[in-house]
Image (cartoon, rainbow, N blue to C red):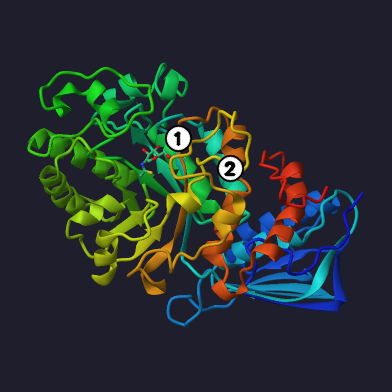
Amino acid sequence: MRAPMRRLGDVIPLPASVRPDEAATFTVTADTAVHADPAASGVAELLAGLLREASGHPIPLSANGSIKLLLDGGTGADDGKNPEGYALVIEADGVTLRAPSAQGLFNGVQTIRQLIPLGTGGDVPLPGGRIEDEPRFAYRGTMLDLARHFFTPEQVRDYIDAIVQFKINHLHLHLTDDQGWRLVIDSWPRLTEVSGGEGTGVDGAGPGFLTANDYTDLVAYAAERFVTIVPEIDMPGHVNAAQVAYPELTADGQAPEPRTDTKVGYSSLVASSEKTYEFVEDVLRELAALTPGPYLHIGGDEAFATPPEDYRTFMTRVLPLVGKYGKRAIGWHEMATVDLPPTAIPQYWRIEPSNEEVARAAAAGHQVIMSPADRTYLDMKYEKYDESSPLGLDWAGLVGIQRSYDWDPAERLPGVGEESVLGVESALWSETLRSLDDVCFMTFPRLAAIAEVAWTPRAARDWEPFSRRLGAFGPRWSAQGITFYQDPEIDWES
Ligand code: TNX
C-alpha cells in the first residue's frame, strides 16, 4: 500500500521558494537510476538507498541515470551562493538536484525524502515543479545533555538520523556537569574512572562515558550527515563530578560528595589556583585534538558559587586557550560579562526580554546563538500535557509547539538583529530522561518547529499551514519508529 502523491510544498522546514507544476509527475520505476558528480557519490548513495527502501527497485548509481545530483562547480565561497542551498527540479522525464556543495545536495535529498509517499514496494510518484532553497541562518543546532543522563553512541547516532531530516546541522553535546563526566581525558583519567561509571547521573541512573574512539566515531558519523559536533565542557560552575575525581580542584583540597540531585550553582573551579588552568588547558587541548569542527563550548552558565570578579578572571584566562588550540569559543551568555575575543559566540538561553551583555557583544560585532528557554528548551513540559508526566521541567514555563514556532530569532533581544544572529539552537537537558524514547518524545515535534524558525524566510512562515504540514509528518515518525508527542491540537494524519 502506498499513500497518495505528496504535494511539492509539503516539506519541513518549508523551502524558501516552491513552484509546483501539477501537470508533471516523475515516477521512480524499476528502470530508474541515480547519476551524480563523483564528489557527491556519498549523498547519491543515500538517496538511492531511500528510493530502494520505498520502491523495492534496484536503483543503481549510473552515468545516465534520470535522477541527477550535480555540483555547480562553484566553491560556494565567493560566487555569492549559499553553500547549503540547492535547486530541485522535478519533471516527467527526470529529476535534477543542483547545489554548490555536497552539503547543499544533502539538504536537497532531505527534501526529496519528504516528497516520497509513505509505503513500501512498487513505483514511487514524485510531484512536479521547482524548489529553490537555502537556509536563513547558518547555525541550526540542538543540544543533548549526556551528563545528567548518559546516552550511548548508538542512541546518539539514532538521534542524529532523526534530526537531520529537518536540516539541523549542529549537535551540541553537554559532556560534563555536577552529576557526571562523560568523555575520557587521557591526562586526567579519574574524571571518567570515578565520575563516569555506575551510580553517576541524576538519581545515579545514567552511567557511562565516551572513550576517545567512541567520540571520534560519533564525530565521523555526524560529519557524513553534515552535522558538526559541538562538545561542551561546562565551567567554572557545574564541576562537582570533576572535583570528586580530583579534590585538588577544590578550594580546600577536600573531595566533595558525589551528587545525583538536580540542584545547580553550588560548585566552582578556583579562579586563583594555577591547578585550575593546568586542568582546563589539558582538557581543552585534548578535546580540540579530537574535534575537527570549529567550535569548543566552554559552558559558563549558572556559576553562582563563583564570585563575579573570579568569574571574570577565569573567563579572561580560559577564552584565549580555546583560540590557542585553533577553535572558536561558544559559551552560555553569562560569558559575555567579559570582553570576548573577536570570534567568541555567546549563546542566549534565558527567558528575559532583554540582555545587556548580549546586546553589548552584538554591538561589538559578535555573532550570537539564540536559545531562549521559553521557546527552544526541549526539556520544558508541553503545554496542556498531563501534569503527572515525569518527563520535563517547567521553570521556563510550559512550551507548546506553537510557542516554539511563533517567535523570531532576530526580534527576540533588543540590539541583536538579523546580522548578529548566527543561528538557533534548542536544548534538551536530561535530568528527567531515561531512554531514547524519552528523548524523542520531548524533541519531536518541537524540533521540527524550531528547525523551520531557523531555516525558512520569516515572511514565508505561518502557524496554520505549518501545523497542517506537521500533521502530515506524524505518520512518518510512526513509520520510522520515532516516539513523538501527539499534541491533541494538531490534526494528525493517520
Ligand atoms: C538551566 S540552561 C541550566 C541547566 C539545567 C537546565 C534545566 C543552562 C545553560 N543551564 O544546568 O539542566 O536549566 O532546564
Give the class, few, some or many, for how many residues have Cα within 10 Å of label 2's Cα (few <14, many ≥20): many
What residue would you read off at disc 1?
Answer: 214
414, above or below 150, in the image: below
Please report contact status of discs 1 and 2: CB closer than 8 Å, yes or no.
no
The residue type indicated by label 2 comes to Tyr
- Quarter location, residue 63: bottom right
199 displayed left or right of 19: left
The secondary element bearing badge 2 is classed as loop
**Quadrant containing ligand 1:** top left
Q: Can residue 243 be seen in this view?
A: yes
Dot 1 or dot 2: first in sequence order is: 1
Residue 361: percent from the left, percent from the top? Answer: 25, 64
260, above or below 33, in the image: above
Q: Which of marks 1 and 2 is in front?
A: 2
Residue 328: percent from the left, percent from the top? Answer: 29, 57
- The residue at the point 27 percent across, 34 percent down is 265
The secondary element bearing badge 1 is classed as helix
From mark 1 to mark 2, how far is it between C-alphas? 33 Å
The residue type indicated by label 1 comes to Asp
Q: Residue 65 carries which label?
A: none
Q: Point out the residue furthest to the bottom here.
A: 79
- Quarter location, residue 403: bottom right
- The residue at the point 81 percent across, 63 percent down is 6
Is the residue marked 1 within 8 Å of ligand 1, measured from its CB?
A: no
368 displayed left or right of 424: left
What residue would you read off at disc 2?
Answer: 382
- The residue at the point 24 percent across, 40 percent down is 303
